[in-house]
Amino acid sequence: MKNPGKVAVLMGGTSAEREVSLHSGAGVLAALRRRGVDAHPFDPANESLENLRRYDRAFIALHGRHGEDGAIQGALELMGIPYTGPGVMASAVGMDKFRSKLLWQAAGLPVPDFCLLDDDTDFAAVETRLGLPLFVKPVREGSSVGISMVQKRGELRAAHAVAKKHDALVMAEAGIMGGEYTVALLGDAALPMVKIEPATPFYDYDAKYLRDDTRYLCPCGLSPEQEKEIQEGAKKAFRILGGKGWSRIDVLMDAAGAHYFLEINTSPGMTSHSLVPIAAKAAGINYEELVLKVLYQESNGTV
């Protein structure tokens, strides 16, 4: 590997996922420094983006808005600075749960049934159509911020009001309750799948970052044939969005064993609870090696 030069580890930012990003960035920064990389923390919330011109390369450990939605990617493109993860279009579309599902659906990939909500929605009709339980989500947030699980008829309107505080676009999605899995993608490879077993009713913010009773199973327990099928579908889903570099695609299973692609994370978490490091470890890649592989993955046209 050639010397990457001076590397900015972008962390923090202004999104609702700021604290998680700071933890991800701290882990990445420490790993790069242990491997002799001239790496430095860079928080866009506290420093002008113009200062990025001092760096040769950027490792994006930002999550959520302005970090995972194409905004910072576009700024780096304009400055000609190579960066990790997918480019502008894949990041922007990937952050939008509604439009990414439309693309996947058009390409024939299975996704949970869904619809947009607004103040004039016939909430009772949506509850009937999607069935219960269902989930209500801000379209352009991550880490389960603003998500509600609707288990009783008549609760959808209140769940919409909660989600609307986080985004003007809100969607409802049928609950697929047979198991949750994730596929980490690194370049052209899919890493071993991880099964997620939260102790909470669903994989919410607390289960992701604060609790110690969430179980992560890798091997995931699926047959090799089924795991391979889902991994190939995840790679297709990534390509459809124009993705390059690395990402993580979440998958749901129903009671009959059919799978559905849920959403993509184009700047996955790198904390002690994060899923990509778990999958990488199962593939024989330790945390430091993973960070270096991500750093050197080709993402945008300037690499």
Image: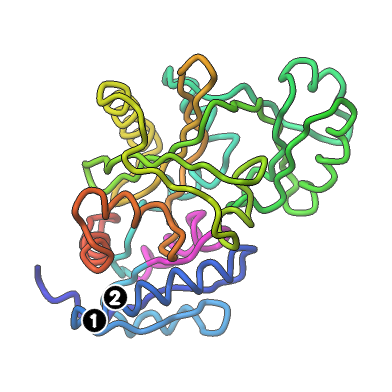
Residue 293, position as x, y percentages in the image: 21, 60
Specify the quadrant of the image occupied by residue 6: bottom left
The residue where tag 1 is placed is 34
- In the image shown, does 172 or 203 lie closer to the viewer? 203
Residues rendered magenta in the picture: 60-79
Residue 69, position as x, y percentages in the image: 51, 54
* Residue at horizontal 46 percent and vertical 23 percent from the top: 259
Q: Amino acid at mark 1?
A: Arg
Mark 2: which secondary structure? helix
* Residue at horizontal 48 percent and vertical 48 percent from the top: 215
* Residue at horizontal 26 percent and vertical 76 percent from the top: 32
- In the image shown, does 82 or 264 lie closer to the viewer? 264
Question: Is residue 157 positioned above or below 223 on the image?
Answer: below
Circles 2 and 1: CB distance less than 8 Å?
A: yes
* The magenta stretch spans residue 77: yes
Image mark for residue 31: 2
